[in-house]
Image (spheres, helix red, strand yellow):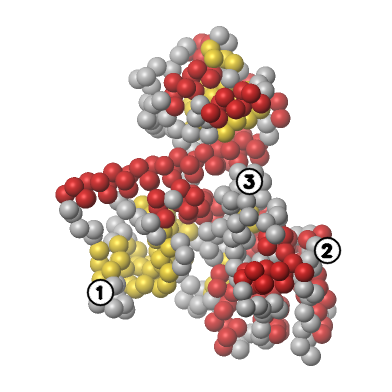
Amino acid sequence: MSLHALVVDDSEDFRLLVGQYIAVEWPDAEVTEWDPVTQGDIDDNFDLSKYDVMLLDYIMGKADGLEWLKRFRRRTDCPPVIFLTGAGSEQVAVLALKNGAFDYLRKHDLSKARLIEALRAAMTERKAAEITQRMARTAAYSDLNRAPEVARVSAGDSPNAQVIEINGYHVIRKIGSGGMSTVYLVKRIEDNQEVVMKILDSKLCEDNEFLMRFIQEYGMISKIESRHIVKIYDQGFTDRHVYIAMEYFANGDLRGRIKSGVVTAEVAIDLLAQVASALQAIHEHGIVHRDLKPENIMFRADDSLAIVDFGIAKMISDVNSLTQTGHILGTPYYLSPEQAKGEALDGRSDLYSAGIMLFEMLAKKRPYVATTPIALVNKHISDPIPKLPAGLERYQPLIEILLAKNPSERFASARQLQDYLAKFGK
């Protein structure tokens, strides 16, 4: 995502600092500075719609930021507002949020990480609102005129199967569907390249939380440069649907390889090393995947490996979690104990999931199984670490580290795991 920000503050130094922070994260960002002291008020003719976010100061000379906030939030073109103060209190924070501020930041303890975090959240909120509004307008128009939704019969599916037509792409066939989206193999018309089209379920487009997750997936992956991370080509929306166009993997997933029995112990270690390389790349960007499993490990035509599906990934520093208290996201077979308990996560949680996959590749079975999800979650939390079958004893110390119940007893980083694997067997 690019960024268009409006910074309303009477301090030139602060406006400059904010601009520098933004330029580091988004080199192509456009930042408009507004000094209330020298430029005066922002009147109703000033177009706010072109901005993704506004940063608004509390005390601006004689101007009252709270009054400006109230007036701006009454406008339909107002972007999310991050309220700033160098002399405010909790009461100011409450008033700002009550009057429509998206977030509240104190200047005296403002860091680059906290500012970027708030800006990313505001951008996602802005885009989600725009998509929701556009879809609502289109749906109302279509219902009024009884216009049928454009669809195309999908090759390889039943004669009645239909998919949404996305401009610039030709649908080949439906690949599958999950709780949030449906996935199609499509061909990009401009160069005939086969790509995967992931389309968010139309009902979930009405749910801001799911919509924000879907939008964030593109924003998270697009900034990571690693051959072991899926490539994202495009994100957009039609009149009714939100989609992501991404890399197509011709050689299937790790689940298929485990089932086929082709994963030897040596191959398992090599695959784990590639997974560790991918995790190091995403963790360096402050991201926890949170849903690492064989189905999310895909292989290209040249047999190189990449991690996919960042739909529930989360910024490590994100204090405004999209997960409600007590609600666990992820696949129960691969949950870390801390994720199962709903605790704060860092990259070591993904290392635990990688350890579960390693055990499964080596033993040809999962380390923990149960008849109910709750029972399975409890096994991750309290059951002892299982032993590998006879003949695989040399891999047990690695399993013990990766599957340690306490994160502090695992590798501190994916880099440490890479270093361990590089020396393994020497």
Q: Earlier in the sequence, mark 1 or mark 2?
A: 1
> Where is residue 45 shown, x and y percent of the image?
35, 20
Mark 1 closeness class: few <14, some 14–19, many ≥20 residues within 10 Å: few
- State the residue lying farthest toward the top: 62
> Is residue 411 depicted above or below 16 in this figure?
below
Q: Secondary structure at mark 2?
A: helix
> Residue at label 3?
318
Q: Quadrant of the C terminus?
A: bottom right
> Is residue 13 depicted above or below 52 in this figure?
above
Q: Note whether residue 244 is visible.
A: yes
Q: Amino acid at mark 1?
A: Asn
Residue 409 tag number: 2
> Where is residue 312 shown, x and y percent of the image?
56, 58
Residue 292 placement: quadrant? bottom right
Q: Earlier in the sequence, mark 1 or mark 3?
A: 1
What residue is shown at x 72% (from left), y 64% (from top)? Answer: 337
Give how far apart the Cα atoms at labels 1 and 3 are: 43 Å
What residue is shown at x 60% (from left), y 83% (from top)? Answer: 258
What residue is shown at x 44% (from left), y 24% (from top)? Answer: 72
Q: Given contact means CB atoms under 8 Å apart, are the residues at marks 2 and 3 in contact?
A: no
Mark 2 closeness class: few <14, some 14–19, many ≥20 residues within 10 Å: few
Q: Nearest the camera: 328 or 271? A: 328
Q: Secondary structure at mark 3?
A: loop
Q: Amino acid at mark 3?
A: Asp
Q: Amino acid at mark 2?
A: Glu
Total labels drawn: 3
Give how far apart the Cα atoms at labels 2 and 3 are: 24 Å
Residue 294 placement: quadrant? bottom right
